[in-house]
Image: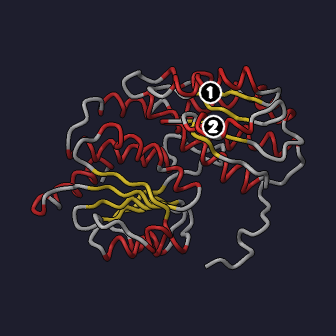
Amino acid sequence: MNYQEMVREINDSKQEIGGIKQIVWIAAGGSHGGFYPAHYFLDQEATTIRSKNITSNEFVKAPPAFVGENTVAVICSMRGTAETIEAAKVAKNLGATTIALYVDESELTEICSYKIAYESLAIDESDFSKTNSAYGLLLAMLLMDEVEGYPHMQTALAEFAKVDAVYKQAAYDIRPRAIKWGLQNRESKSIHVMGSGPTFGAAYIFSICNVMEMLQIDSPTVNSCDFFHGPFEVINEETSVFLIIGQGRSRSNDERAARFLQEFGGRKVFTLDALEVGIGQFDDQVSEYFNHLILAPILNNVFMRELAYQIKKDYNTRTYMWKAAYE
């Protein structure tokens, strides 16, 4: 069964109860951020489908009232995080149709009605059109097309075929800039990461998973729009800022932040334009939704690794993860 057939089967199974009305994206940490492009797509394009992106334990403790038989729950965990498995149980008990995204089989894949194996964005040999974020976005598009119709569905399907090549060329081309950024931030105690619209999920993952988790450097995530409603007050000549300029309708918001930072920031202000990493190669009708699929692995595999090298940090080490009890 291919993914279009799977989505059609799910939609057909719900026709007698009114069809698919909600899609909830459930995961923890980087997997949660990885669902951002899927949720963002539905937020922007869907008129009848309700979408919510929620962390696993929040869903366990406070599942939204709308979750029921008309809901599709897409649940991601690389190896079977305990709270994500519990969230799958809750979703299934509430009547939702469950789809597991996974790397290794676990109790999650036993619980869920459908399952899709994905390839890790942290492994250079992966096919980057088959990451969790890519499959999440594909599912969002297919579900919307099945329920409401999506006029650019065929264009989008063709664009997924470009993702792996675009990413791998971009990872090679951008490395000199990543080296420069790493050198500039060898002594940084805090790195602000900014983005908006379709890039905010990539910014969030870069902050919480790459800079804070892997490198143990403080890293606030700031929306480029809300930057002007408080966060810009901390900017000075020494503030380290990593600003992502996305391609799409929110680009002017990122450019506005870039102009301010150019005037008032210092040598540690760094801007990464999505056009530098190949987003311009995607069709304009859908390119906005592909920002994350290229940017997230670039940030993890090029920028994070380069900073780790510069500060002589083994990015696989942790202070608390896998060590301290927090259940």
Circle 2 sits on which residue? 194
Q: SS for tag 2?
A: strand
Task: Mark 2 and mark 1 in contact? Answer it, CB < 8 Å.
Answer: yes
* Tag in front: 2 or 1: 1
Q: Amino acid at mark 2?
A: Met
Residue under the image location 50 percent in, 70 percent down: 57
Q: What x and y, as percent, mark residue 78?
A: 55, 61
* Circle 1 Cα neighbour tier, 10 Å, few/some/many (<14 / 14–19 / ≥20): many
- The image quarter in which residue 101 lies: bottom left
Residue under the image location 73 percent in, 76 percent down: 324
Residue under the image location 68 percent in, 27 percent down: 271
Q: What x and y, as percent, mark residue 158?
A: 38, 30
Circle 1 sits on which residue? 257
Q: Is residue 66 left or right of residue 108?
A: left
Residue under the image location 73 percent in, 20 percent down: 263
**In this picture, is 227 found above or below 74?**
above
Q: What x and y, as percent, mark residue 32?
A: 52, 56
Q: What x and y, as percent, mark residue 20?
A: 22, 55
**In this picture, is 77 found above or below 256?**
below
